[in-house]
Image (cartoon, rainbow, N blue to C red):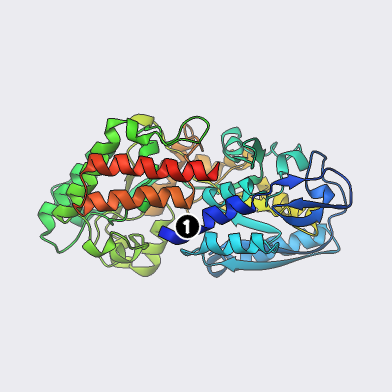
Amino acid sequence: MRAGRLTGSVAGVIALALTAAGCGLSGGSGGGDATAGGCKVDQGNVGSGKLTGKAEGKITFQTTNLKKDFGDFFNGVIKAFEKVHPGTSVKWIDDPGDNTFTQRNVADAQACTLPDVINLNSETATALTKAGYLLNIGVKDPDAEKPFVPAFWNSSTMKDGSGMPAHTVLPWYTGGIVLTYNTDLLEKAGIDPAKPPTTLFGLFADYEKVAKASDGKFYATMANPVWRIPADFDQMNIKVLSDDGRTAVFGDDPRTTQWVAWMAKLYQEGAMPKDSLSSSNDPSTLYSQGKVAYGSTNPSFVRFVKQNSPSVYAKTGVGQQPFDALGHTTGAPQYIGVAATSKHAPAALAFAEFLTNAENQTAWCKDPDVVIFPTTTASLDDPFFQKVSGDDPFSEARKLVAEQLKTATADQTNLSPAVQNAIVAQVQLAMQGKKSPAQAVKDAQAKANELLKQAG
């Protein structure tokens, strides 16, 4: 469900293009023309006034890889909305959420054709907000925050082109971060599945045990650090960016170099498939084939395994991903944004709020084939999320996430694809033995700062 990430030069081009196109918002409340991200829009879509007007007209709603599994549910939501708001029509499209997700949405934004209502991850929402392509929902509907858990609403605060906070997205659904693992493979490596490590370096030590026991027949995890940066740094409570977000500071913490040294050691010792260093593939396929000991940290991953490899599902265990120095997990909500370029913004905003209301969030999150949690207070009070029984992998994942939500925050470090990939590239060089971990960290921070300076 989560959108893929871009790699290398393509991400850099997109970041620069967004910066160049980021004309921001101009205009105020009322009719007439204004601009959003360089596109001509109705003046009511931008500026300081509350959005007014009747919810009517045809709008486009884009999700990310949801139509195959949840078509009936969302078609039902659309029909219900159209019944409540006569004169509206919602066209549903579904993006595959692959490596070019950001690229496609940036291209649509720059062509002034961004879908009216769009499912976004944090990275893409951050970029589109900075460039001025999303409606400032917090301004256009001051009551929009009321249904949501405060931590999740606060996490939807992005920064516009001038660096000011803007609530341009609604928090939609979230999942926790769990360990999924093949109990048979862990036992072969002498690891007790019932005692998951409490630190990331402790998890790395278990990866090393897998490498030594497997003799190349199976692996611990995938190599590409794109899946772990900056998530691991956040969990270790390593400060990644300065408070104003304009400077990279992760290299100032000695644990960052230790982390890179561990990644290099594990890669060289065979804990990870050699051909996965630059691959964009997550562990799904190899885990389902019994070739990787640890699966995805997304709780809904267990659904994929159950559907595609029942024999491996029977061996799958679920445990707590290390809390490490942070002491709790950070949620990773998916968001719903409304295009500032929408020609029917009142209808688009009404649908975004209808989709994310407590009733619809509760209904979807109760689907037996998904491990996700709602972001509204009323939904989380439902007994379904407070009293979880059963000992199958799905139930275990739900229990863990339900417990996590008691202390979780939704605050995560947001890096542009260009900055993230600049850091990843240096770590990859260290993993290949082409640079020392210390030099790789130093160069990663320098390159990140170059890009941050360019972005302004």
Between residue 276 and residue 21, name the one nearer to us: 21
Q: Where is residue 136 in the image (x, y as percent from the top left)?
A: 71, 44
Give the residue at x 47% y 55%.
12
Give the residue at x 33% y 63%.
279
* Mark 1 lies on residue: 11
In the visual, does 344 lie left or right of 23? right
In the visual, does 85 lie left or right of 145? right
Examine the rendering and report whether any part of residue 135 can be seen.
yes
Q: Position of residue 175 (x, y in %)?
A: 48, 47
Compared with 232, 355 (above or below) is: below
In the visual, does 398 lie left or right of 130? left
Between residue 387 and residue 139, name the one nearer to us: 139
Residue 203 sits in quarter? top left
Between residue 167 and residue 131, name the one nearer to us: 131
Q: What element carries label 1?
A: helix
Q: Where is residue 388 in the image (x, y as percent from the top left)?
A: 46, 44
The amino acid type found where label 1 is placed reads Ala
Give the residue at x 46% y 46%.
451
Image quadrant holding the C terminus, namely: top right
Compared with 156, 210 (above or below) is: below
Q: Characterize the local packing of mark 1: few (<14), some (14-19) or many (20 or more) Cα atoms within 10 angstroms.
A: many
